[in-house]
Amino acid sequence: MNDAERQSLIDSGKMFKVLDDGFVRLVDTMGGDSSIVQAARVSYGAGTKKSSEDRDLIRYLLRHQHTTPFEMCEIKLHVRVPMDCWRQWIRHRTANVNEYSTRYSLAIDSTQRTKPNQWRIQASNNKQGSDGIVDAANGALLSEREARLHAACRAEYTDRIAMGIAREQARKDLPLSTYTEAYWKIDLNNLLHFLALRMEANAQYEIREYAKTIGEKIVSQWVPMAWEAFCEYRMNAVTFSKTEQQLLSLIYAGNNTAVLARLRAINWIKGEGSETKPILEAREFLNKLADLKIDLPLA
Amino acid sequence: MNDAERQSLIDSGKMFKVLDDGFVRLVDTMGGDSSIVQAARVSYGAGTKKSSEDRDLIRYLLRHQHTTPFEMCEIKLHVRVPMDCWRQWIRHRTANVNEYSTRYSLAIDSTQRTKPNQWRIQASNNKQGSDGIVDAANGALLSEREARLHAACRAEYTDRIAMGIAREQARKDLPLSTYTEAYWKIDLNNLLHFLALRMEANAQYEIREYAKTIGEKIVSQWVPMAWEAFCEYRMNAVTFSKTEQQLLSLIYAGNNTAVLARLRAINWIKGEGSETKPILEAREFLNKLADLKIDLPLA
Amino acid sequence: MNDAERQSLIDSGKMFKVLDDGFVRLVDTMGGDSSIVQAARVSYGAGTKKSSEDRDLIRYLLRHQHTTPFEMCEIKLHVRVPMDCWRQWIRHRTANVNEYSTRYSLAIDSTQRTKPNQWRIQASNNKQGSDGIVDAANGALLSEREARLHAACRAEYTDRIAMGIAREQARKDLPLSTYTEAYWKIDLNNLLHFLALRMEANAQYEIREYAKTIGEKIVSQWVPMAWEAFCEYRMNAVTFSKTEQQLLSLIYAGNNTAVLARLRAINWIKGEGSETKPILEAREFLNKLADLKIDLPLA
Amino acid sequence: MNDAERQSLIDSGKMFKVLDDGFVRLVDTMGGDSSIVQAARVSYGAGTKKSSEDRDLIRYLLRHQHTTPFEMCEIKLHVRVPMDCWRQWIRHRTANVNEYSTRYSLAIDSTQRTKPNQWRIQASNNKQGSDGIVDAANGALLSEREARLHAACRAEYTDRIAMGIAREQARKDLPLSTYTEAYWKIDLNNLLHFLALRMEANAQYEIREYAKTIGEKIVSQWVPMAWEAFCEYRMNAVTFSKTEQQLLSLIYAGNNTAVLARLRAINWIKGEGSETKPILEAREFLNKLADLKIDLPLA
């Protein structure tokens, strides 16, 4: 694809840039909101045709996890992704995939670059997350060193190729930041599952950017009713465990003493006075309460 | 399997009777609670080995839908099920299946019989459910006619076979109540998904009986920690949509006028005074509130 | 669908009748021969664009079992099938399915009828096959009795419904010959696998009729190059085992004495003179030889 | 795992070294040859119990692609693999996987090293293959430079971690040669499919080494009858297309003039006299003939 072709796709709303040199391109779709309804109605027969509006039916299906009608929609994307991100992406096994072959062709000459203000600090409270950005001086240093490392890796690759080494072996020391491309085809049900996991706050930044682009720029336009229902009943829904429901009962009954007694009885809070400490599961519960604007003082 | 062998399996806790002539038999398992932990720890490395207890880790994984470690456990069952029920069962595509072949062998000479007090009445408020039992006189009549129909179908099948008709064609008019048998092998993650859908109150009675047997008699013994977490975080959990969370906020604030105004604004209740009527989604919400012992008067 | 709509679909080449009251209807497709090529070329990069013709590339891919590009094509069918046949169909797990629900709606009032000249005799040499047709008198008798049985089953179903029995239970004694309907969506690679298994001579007549309709009427028009390659390299291909290759070597060397000695050494033929008997695997080999117009006398 | 534990596993035949620092470790199995037979017999009923030997039945099933009984066996492996190789491995979607997380833990400090006599030359006749080894001087140079590049990449990774960069981002420039580990669980049918593709001569050397280890060291011991049948009917089988069968017929008839005429008619050979050139598909056919010791002079 040359630059003019790419620009034309972007202008037409069929291509979306992601990260520094990645993209998501809409190749094809099969079906839409109406196909979900059509499939649901073969299950339910003619009976519901009049009484149910399409939107209501789609919301009902998604709310009650009747997922098979959503499989009747299919989408095909062409994506360009750093291999490190692709390693996470490919774990979703229900898609059809054709990836660019660096065994057959020369590796794409592009790696994901990190700007000085994009180096993320290891989160202290989440072993698999990040929290904040390093200072400007270190960021600049890291970006500069990154550029040198990318150049060294590419030079080694190019030299190996020049010396006649097989592409399948020459590629072995490309950095994980190297971009790859793929056609990726998936049904809407499995795509929504992918989006639910990868748009979440604790998904890694890079894949979250791709997921948000696919969801907000493409799916929302393709199947607006399904997208709306997904946001309402899944993306922004909250789940309470059996224990949490018992606590909610006590909270809504206004009996804070009983709540605290119960939290101690099930070992969700430990320590006394200023030493009072909730365990991880309790902290997760408090966060859900805060979203409901419920404040629960622990001491 | 002869009667003595079957009784011995039942005594050993490896076989469980379901319905009038069905069963679930435990054939083999791979792994257990410890395999879930083992697999999770290859993901997380040695770091967590000391700090996390197995039970806490399994609960954490299930709560946060880290489902892949549960796929490391596998179970194989031998089941005997009416074909009508098997038609629902087989829709779960992630299992391995070997079903008894009525093309190769004579059909099993057994059909699911309904006792006079087991004939269920069509639910008026749920097109795909039942509600209550028909009266004794009608029940007796229906069971008697059922027996005659089963006999007529079997006689036709037997006659066709006797006349030399191919088994693959002779079977074409067996009733859906005819029992079939199968080996069914599935990983724990997909089994829990099956159980969540099929143990639910609105699953059909017959498959619910199988699901409950598998869950409560077999899975609970095989992987007790995973089973406990499943009951806590999935089977008995409740989910609130974005809209429901906003309503929960208003309810906690004690502002019932605002709640009712909002319910009308989003068209969840219609009509005035004694004509006040909540729509389906509103009734579902009220049911969830009732479980939390929250009473919300609509007028 | 009313009769006029159905006829219009048939006239347009989008609907095909199968059996006495079944059909296959083309609902939608995604992609085509060009999508296979497009996907293969993202794998292989721009390098091959000029040198390879589309047809050659598709044939190469299919010949070498590079199956993933074929997954880039998707098809959606609406089918009407006897439940007995559907029981085989649904075993192909890689498709998306929405079936007509007899739990939610009244069962379709149609069963597969067998004409007097369609009753097949059990094959003597193949436990799961048929061979020949019963005589006219017996055929007429069987068809008449079949009609009576269908009527009795339907009457029982209708009476149960009239007595208020839940649809989910009333259906339990419908005969397997009852028609059901479904939307069925599958990618081309998995569809070709389905067709290879179900168009084969030893697939059951009923599902073979559906498979042939899908293959010859629909796939051949939709992706003509892939269909041609499928017929050439898969449907009409033959496979020889390691042992068979060794025998072929001897046969092509013209050394029939050595062939016979080897057949005896590996126990593929037993007995002497007119008692000489090939085992099953040897008979399969002889059949393959016959297709190559090679005659191998065993004695 | 410490060195003593690893050695003990190797001694017990449960762990096998692959490449310079990889391994395949047998963690668990479910079932075996007898489970294949057991499952096949539930399909076929009691009828075959006496007449068929287990070995014959397994060979029959594999020969006729009755694949579902093979799904009744399950195996779990712990593997250590370079990420470049893992990128190919993970494309087999039917397995259960838990991979070591470099988001959660520090990346494994090991990369696949290439010895001076292991640098492979790009194949001239196969864009995705290699052919031969570079000379000793270049090999030594490449290995030395590889070591330096690995050290540079690791140093950068270590420095980023030391500067507080999140593990999920610090890893972005690790070379593809970095080792990863995973638990990999798969049923026997899908494993045999994996082995058929990855033990083949044109699979890449690295993954072929893993596949051969799994097949020859583990599967051959675990399910010896299935393994033997797999080698006979699949791994060492040959397939002839419809066109090739027609040619084989002509060749057997001894009519070389007709063979050559046909090869020209279908454009499989082009040019005259010493310029005579077979196309790719013709060369593939000639190779198959050579394996049968059939010599077909083209001019």
Image (cartoon, coloured by chain):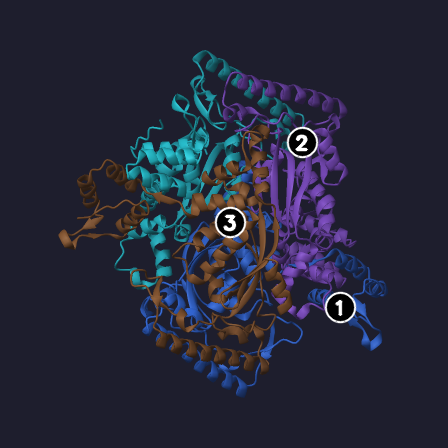
Chain colours: A cyan, B brown, C blue, D purple
Kindly identify which numbered label has been placed on residue D1. 2
What distance separates the C-alpha of mark 1 from that of mark 2? 52 Å
Asked whether the beta carbons under mark 3 and mark 2 sit within 8 Å of each other, the answer is no
Tell me the amino acid under the disc marked 1: Ile
- Circle 1 chain: C
Q: For the residue labelled by badge 2, is the local secondary structure a helix, a strand or a loop?
A: loop
Tell me: residue C95, above or below residue C165: above
Check if mark 1 and mark 2 are on a common chain. no
* Snapshot quadrant of residue D6: top right
Tell me which amino acid carries mark 2.
Met
Mark 1–mark 3 Cα distance, whole angstroms, equals 43 Å
Answer whether residue D295 is visible to the viewer in this image.
Answer: yes
* Residue of label 1: C279
Q: Nearer the viewer, residue A95 or B123?
A: B123
Q: Is residue A146 above or below residue A208?
A: above
Residue assigned mark 3:
B190
